[in-house]
């Protein structure tokens, strides 16, 4: 296997994007612990997102989660807390197959984010992590990683503000994935998701973002709160879909199991985060 194909082949999410005619399904990890990472990866995901923005994931937890996910042949993706370049570097240096930036607002922010994720001459990422290669199988050398990373690692931004929505056609060609956060997007356009119900204007905004990625030849992802909702967006043509989150799934399963044990009706689900 040549140097160029080694990291591309190891990045399962990118491989699904380019080789498979189906959406890449994944899980959201908010609770720290490599055992949780492994449980999510073993459940059949193409990718697991390590949430350092809203999850209970500090730098050390991220460094444990990423290799645990990758060791099972699943792509670890890291959502950074903020658009600071050092956060992009830490995520990629621990072996992330891609980085997701939240709350993007401007084209310049996106360009700056991408530059932080790329080695020169395409960007300004510093080189030297001895850990990044360990998240890829077969294991690349440091030289192979340096030569491969720009083409192999995924840059993703969340479209969840009015400003980003307004500039979506300019943003779409700059990254690999536009990822929709429906809750923040709804809040920012004045149409919040209430009890799991989406306003038609929010539905239109989501369709607009998907259309921008199709015109740009890039990929579109979306955060879902149930398997049924994930199937709906799969049928719409989305490429990357969150199916479940660890903490909400744990809470729901425990509540349902307890209700069954007590002979009670199952709790009603209203599309919570």
Image: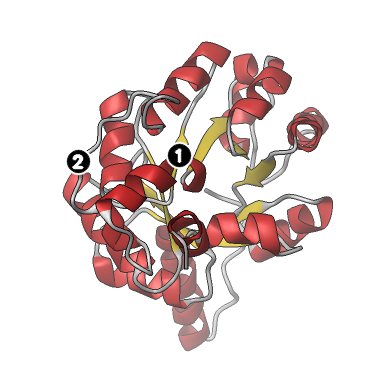
Image height check: is 11 above or below 161? below
Image height check: is 90 above or below 10? above
Question: Residue at the location (20% across, 45% down)?
Answer: 129
Left or right position of 108 against 227: left
Image height check: is 185 above or below 66? above
Question: Residue at the location (72% across, 63% down)?
Answer: 228
Residue 114 point in image, percent of width and height = 46, 27
Residue 242 point in image, percent of width and height = 58, 55
Disc marking residue 150 = 1
Residue 184 point in image, percent of width and height = 56, 30
Left or right position of 8 against 170: left
Quarter residue 189 falls in: top right
Check disc 2 and report the residue beneath it.
128
- Packing grade of label 1 (10 A; few <14, some 14-19, many >=20) is some
Image height check: is 226 above or below 41? above
Residue 211 point in image, percent of width and height = 81, 34
- Say whether marks 2 and 1 touch (CB < 8 Å): no
């Amino acid at each position: 296997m040549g140097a160029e194909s080694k990291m591309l082949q190891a990045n399962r999410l990118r491989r699904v994007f380019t080789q498979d005619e189906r959406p890449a399904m994944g899980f959201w990890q908010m609770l720290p612990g490599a055992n949780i990472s492994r449980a999510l990866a073993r459940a059949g995901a193409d990718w697991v997102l390590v949430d350092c923005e809203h999850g209970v994931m500090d730098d050390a937890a991220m460094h444990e989660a990423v290799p645990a996910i990758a060791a099972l042949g699943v792509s670890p993706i890291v959502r950074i807390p903020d658009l600071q370049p050092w956060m992009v570097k830490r995520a990629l240096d621990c072996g992330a197959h891609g980085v997701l930036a939240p709350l993007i607002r401007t084209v310049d922010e996106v360009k700056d984010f991408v530059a932080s994720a790329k080695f020169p001459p395409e960007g300004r990422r510093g080189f030297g992590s001895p850990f990044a290669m360990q998240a890829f199988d077969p294991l690349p050398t440091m030289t192979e990683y340096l030569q491969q990373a720009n083409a192999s690692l995924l840059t993703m931004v969340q479209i969840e503000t009015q400003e980003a929505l307004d500039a979506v056609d300019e943003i779409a060609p700059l990254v690999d994935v536009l990822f929709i956060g429906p809750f923040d997007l709804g809040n920012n356009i004045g149409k919040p998701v209430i009890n799991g119900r989406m306003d038609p204007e929010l539905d239109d905004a989501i369709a607009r973002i998907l259309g921008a990625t199709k015109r740009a030849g890039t990929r579109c992802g979306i955060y879902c709160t149930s398997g049924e909702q994930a199937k709906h967006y799969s049928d719409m043509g989305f490429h990357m879909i969150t199916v479940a989150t660890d903490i909400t799934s744990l809470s729901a399963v425990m509540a349902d199991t307890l209700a069954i044990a007590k002979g009670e009706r199952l709790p009603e689900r209203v599309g919570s985060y």
